[in-house]
Amino acid sequence: MSRHRIVVIGSGPGGSAIAALMAHAGHDVTLVERNAFPGGKCSSLPRDGFVVDTGVHMFGRGPVGPFGTISRILGEGPTWLASTPSFTLSLPGGRLEMASSILHPISILNFMKGHARGWQRMGWTSTASRALGALGPRGLFSLARRFNHPRYPLYAELQDVSVRDFMTTLSGSEDFLRTFHAQAMLTMVLPWHRASMGEFAYILASTMQASRLCYPCGGSGAVPASFLRALRRKRGIIRLDCEVSRIETKEGRVRGVTSSKGEFLPADVVISSAGLRRTVELAGRDAFPRDYLEVADGLRDSEAFVAVKFFLERKVSSMRTPCLLHMPGLSPHAMFDYLEDGGVPSDLFLFVTAPGNWDPSLVPPGGDCLIVGVPAPSSLGRQDQARSLLDLAQELARGIFPEIDKAATAVEMVLTGDISRLSGRAGGDCIGAAQEVGQSGSRRPTPATPIGGLFLVGADAGGRGIGTEMAADSALRLYFRLKDGFLRPRGAGDPCDRG
């Protein structure tokens, strides 16, 4: 395979991974990043003795998923930390400590405990009876068998069915439905009427098979940092504080990129992790056919996770696991209505992480940090609502963790505008192209674009899984596509160029 000049835009999980992989394949790779630090939305920054994630992250399978595959190819990757119990379920009546899989003995025992004390009645018997009536014995057995298949065939079969429609067919239990609605929001950052059951089934099946919930040693930024180490080892170039203002094309092929400072970087191939719409803007709309522009313009993004961060001088003794999920005492059918109606509910679903419980080096000796994440609308025009949601989240967090009042030395908010400035995207979306009905599975944008030599990577480009894993999965898929014969000597032509 000929050696090519490749420019990669963005250093998040997808961009850093594909840059390292293509350098590993023998190409001359330059990675450009608009921020003064690497990682994009998957970054960790020092602050007064803390190492703090810029966002609220869930990594799922860690070394068992695409991150592990990439690391094995490169011979370089993050060190993964796991904990069992993995998270605490905070319910109106009390708390349950759970494993990452609902079939783990710890999870089963705590489900039984919650049921016995009346904290959470999942209605397993009524759910089984309803599912049996809806699907029949053969259909229910077939569903379970296909769900556990290692290649997840339900991903394609259910891509056009919403999580709401599927789950309400199986159960009428409010606690059951509330739990799965919250899981869809946590893993896909979408309300269940938008979320694709095919995508959700893949996430559930792959996570349960991996049977772990992981976090990278050193914080979320350790993931892209490890891939960038591999890139440097292969003599790749990393340009921080280098924003791309234009992807240069000529006669239907890329020529390189121009930075905001006017520097031209020539390239045979450009791989963008800036998102589909932003990539179209950088290359110029006149370079794309009308039908491709319609796809880009019609793409819907995930919602946001805004956050309030508590920096504490003492450990939070009531937070025994690395994560806590606060389940609101609201109807499962209405718990995320505020994302569309603009209101502020009486209670909120919260995703709370204590990174120091995974990796003590992330906090000062004796100190602690809590990151309280709240689903919020991704539109920058609704930041006032997001701020009100975080005000309520602070109030709820102080009730869940009474130590906060006396131990907090600083409190910071992360709003959608902060996320947008970090990513360079037009909104504050948490993931990117939404894994929703109508644009999931085979309907997601592909890595190839109509411009020869221009590719996409990241959450907008055909991967599967939870947020960061989906970006890494897209990089892995693109690597195998390019590695297995796409990049040919100039002039040889390639059908993949035509997308």
Image (cartoon, rainbow, N blue to C red):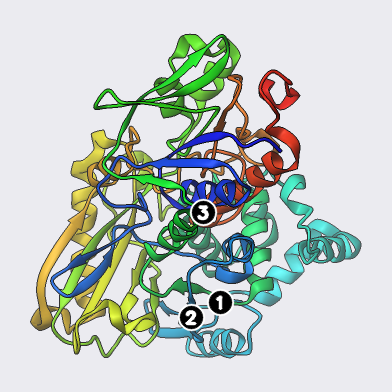
Screen quadrant of the C terminus:
top right
Cβ–Cβ below 8 Å for labels 3 and 2? no
What amino acid is labelled 3 in the image? Lys
Label 2: state its secondary structure: loop
Disc assigned to residue 18: none
What amino acid is labelled 1 in the image? Ser
Q: Position of residue 390 (x, y in %)?
A: 22, 57
Q: Position of residue 187 (x, y in %)?
A: 50, 58
| Residue picked out by circle 2 | 86
Cβ–Cβ below 8 Å for labels 1 and 2? yes
Task: Answer with mark 1 or mark 2, whichever residue precedes in sequence.
Answer: 2
Residue pictured at 33% horizontal, 75% vertical:
355
Few, some or many residues within 10 Å of mark 1 (<14, 14–19, 20+): many
Report whether 103 appears left or right of 55. Answer: right
Task: Answer with mark 3 or mark 2, whichever residue precedes in sequence.
Answer: 2
Q: Position of residue 95 (x, y in %)?
A: 40, 84
Q: Depth check: give the residue in front, 468 or 69.
A: 69
| Residue picked out by circle 1 | 100
| Residue picked out by circle 3 | 234
Residue pictured at 76% horizontal, 57% vertical:
152
What amino acid is labelled 2 in the image? Ser
Foreground label between 3 and 1: 3
In terms of image quadrants, where is residue 96?
A: bottom left
Question: Marks 3 and 2, how far apart in space?
Answer: 36 Å
